[in-house]
Structures are given as C-alpha cells and as structure tokens.
Image (spheres, grey):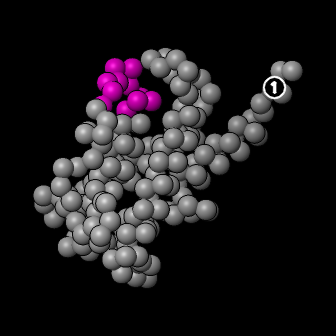
C-alpha cells in the first residue's frame, strides 16, 4: 500500500520537530545551557571520568562539523575514526579556545537547524545514495544528546551544575 501523500502541513510539522530535537530543551538538554558558563580553569578536569569537558566539546564540534560537511559537500572525505574525532589532550592549548570551539559548535548547530527548516529532508544526497538530510539531522541530534548528557553528568561531578542563574 503506498504511503499517503505528504502535505505542506505535515512537512512543516516534521521540520519543526527536527529543529526542536536539534536545539534541545524538551527531553534533551539545551546545548547552550550545557556548554555555557563553564570556568576556563575547569574544562580540562576529568573528575575521574573518561573525558574532560574540553574533550567532549571538541568531539561534539568536530563530529557535528563533519556531518554538516557531509551533507553540504559532494567532495566530502571520510575522516579516520577514532583518531580524527577526539582531541589529543584533556584541555585546550589556549584559554580562548574553549569559547571559540563552543561558538563554532553553536554556529554549526544553527546551520543544521536552518537545513531542517529549509532543506529537502527526503531526497537522497547526490554524492551519497541511500543517505538523506533527514537521516543526517537525526544522527546529529542523537549524537549531541548523548554527549551533552555526558557534559551535564561531568558538570555535576565538578560541582558546576546546575549553572549559576544570570
């Protein structure tokens, strides 16, 4: 039995839901809240865990940028897993790098939300048959939700959660 035709209303609803999933809130932590207000001198502390806040942010930024590149670029080149996807140290080499990386992650997140709101969610990517924008957006949201959960858990261990109210 063929699927019922999609309506403009159902497409708009799907776009809204995917954008909301990417942005967090609802049942997932908001990336801006999870990554905001972290003292620079604490981002390299693992607090007995496997990763520091820096490592988690760096991984989130790199992976999300990789997904964004994959959907945008027919010349996409596969990265080496896991070597390319994790930083080589628990803290950034320069104090300003935490904020620059956080801003880059948030800018790419906004770009993914824009694609959710305007892109063709169901068309296969020309350079990757079988892959759709919808699949990649869901992948990005799922990946971010998992690691942002780790960020919150680590911030709790570090005594940095919940964040101070403005």
As drawn, the residue found furthest toward the right would be 1
Q: Which residue lies under the disc numbered 1?
A: 3
Q: Is residue 140 left or right of residue 91?
A: right
Residue at 39 percent of width and 20 percent of height: 74
Name the spot of residue 73 as percent of width and height, x first.
Answer: 38, 25
Quarter of the picture containing the C terminus is bottom left
Name the spot of residue 129 as percent of width and height, x first.
Answer: 52, 17
Question: Can residue 99 be seen?
Answer: no
In the rendered view, tell whether residue 29 sits above or below residue 118.
below
Quarter of the picture containing the N terminus is top right
Q: Is residue 74 magenta?
A: yes
Foreground: 79 or 64?
Answer: 79
Q: What stretch is highlighted in magenta?
A: 69-79
Question: Can residue 132 be seen?
Answer: yes
Q: Is residue 15 magenta?
A: no
Instruction: Examine the image and state in which quarter residue 130 appears.
Output: top right
Q: What element carries label 1?
A: loop
Q: Is residue 16 left or right of residue 89?
A: right
Question: What predominant SS class does the magenta segment belong to?
Answer: loop
Instruction: Examine the image and state in which quarter residue 71 appears.
Output: top left
């Amino acid at each position: 039995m063929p699927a019922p035709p999609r309506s403009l209303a159902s497409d708009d609803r799907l776009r809204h839901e995917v954008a909301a999933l990417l942005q967090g809130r609802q049942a997932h932590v908001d990336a801006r809240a999870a990554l905001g207000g972290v003292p620079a001198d604490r981002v390299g502390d693992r607090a007995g865990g496997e990763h520091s806040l820096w490592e988690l942010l760096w991984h989130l930024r790199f992976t999300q940028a990789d997904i964004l590149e994959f959907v945008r670029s027919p010349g996409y080149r596969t990265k080496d897993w896991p070597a390319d996807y994790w930083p080589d140290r628990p803290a950034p080499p320069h104090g300003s790098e935490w904020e620059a990386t956080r801003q880059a992650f948030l800018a790419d997140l906004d770009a993914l939300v824009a694609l959710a709101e305007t892109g063709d969610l169901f068309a296969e990517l020309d350079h990757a048959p079988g892959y759709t924008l919808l699949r990649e957006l869901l992948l990005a949201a799922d990946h971010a939700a998992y690691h942002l959960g780790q960020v919150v858990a680590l911030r709790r261990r570090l005594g940095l959660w919940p964040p101070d109210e403005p």
